């Protein structure tokens, strides 16, 4: 990508917000055990930080999903590439993703999980782009709401790169 990096959320701001989210999620579950399901690959950094910010008893599992046929925008066609190892039936489930934009991925995953008869399903995302929403779906816990800008870092990629950046940024022309 061309241009100068423009940091939208610093490493410190992310850490503070994730800590707040962890406390809010713990308060919501109020001592219940939680099955946390991270959506790979984008959520792995956020999910790792979020579960470490939580005190709830939890099991952690992952699903691999994809809806991005190119590096910039969702195709709306969500593919689920891996099954869960954990038993979902009768459990409180928290699905963790890096970003909700069109809403197709989370909507599809939540429907898939609900078919497994959990006690409850909630969602947590680091970023929300409501201006891109194509379905009537909102996350239950959100880190930051952002405008429709292309962002990378903190698990979000450009091609196969930049997931390792500890902050979230875009590029200035």
Image (cartoon, rainbow, N blue to C red):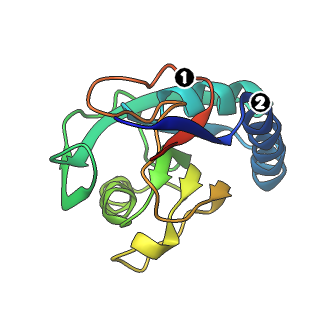
Q: Look at 56% across and 47% down and name the residue there.
A: 94
138 displayed left or right of 73? right
Q: Look at 57% across and 52% down and name the residue there.
A: 127
Q: Where is residue 49 in the image (x, y as percent from the top left)?
A: 66, 27
Q: Can residue 120 be seen in this view?
A: no
Q: Look at 48% across and 51% down and name the residue there.
A: 99
Q: Residue under circle 1?
A: 165
Q: Position of residue 33 (x, y in %)?
A: 68, 38
Which numbered mark, 2 or 1, is in the foreground of this view?
A: 1
10 Å crowding of disc 2: few (<14), some (14-19), many (20+): some
Q: Which residue lies furthest to the top in this view?
A: 164
- Given residues 55 and 11, the one toward you in this image is 11
Q: Residue under circle 2?
A: 53
Q: Where is residue 57 in the image (x, y as percent from the top left)?
A: 72, 30
Q: Is residue 44 visible?
A: yes
- Given residues 26 and 158, the one toward you in this image is 158
Q: Look at 48% across and 27% down and name the residue there.
A: 44
Counting labels gives: 2
- Given residues 64 and 73, the one toward you in this image is 73
Going from N to C along the chain, the mark reached first, 2 or 1, is 2
* Vertical comparison of 88 with 118: above or below: above
């Amino acid at each position: 990508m061309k241009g100068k990096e423009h940091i939208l959320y610093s490493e410190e701001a992310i850490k503070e917000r994730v800590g707040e989210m962890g406390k809010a999620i713990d308060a919501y579950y109020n001592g219940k055990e939680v099955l946390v399901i991270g959506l790979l690959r984008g959520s792995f950094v956020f999910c790792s930080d979020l579960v470490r910010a939580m005190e709830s008893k939890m099991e952690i599992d992952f699903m691999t999903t994809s809806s991005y046929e190119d590096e910039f925008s969702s195709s709306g066609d969500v593919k689920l590439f891996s099954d869960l190892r954990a038993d979902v039936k009768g459990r409180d489930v928290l699905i963790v993703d890096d970003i909700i934009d069109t809403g197709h991925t989370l909507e599809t995953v939540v429907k898939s999980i609900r078919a497994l008869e959990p006690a409850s399903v909630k969602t947590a995302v680091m970023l929300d782009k409501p201006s891109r929403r194509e379905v009537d779906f909102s996350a239950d816990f959100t880190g930051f709401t952002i405008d429709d800008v292309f962002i990378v870092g903190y698990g979000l990629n450009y091609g196969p790169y930049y997931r390792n950046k500890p902050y979230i940024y875009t590029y200035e022309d």
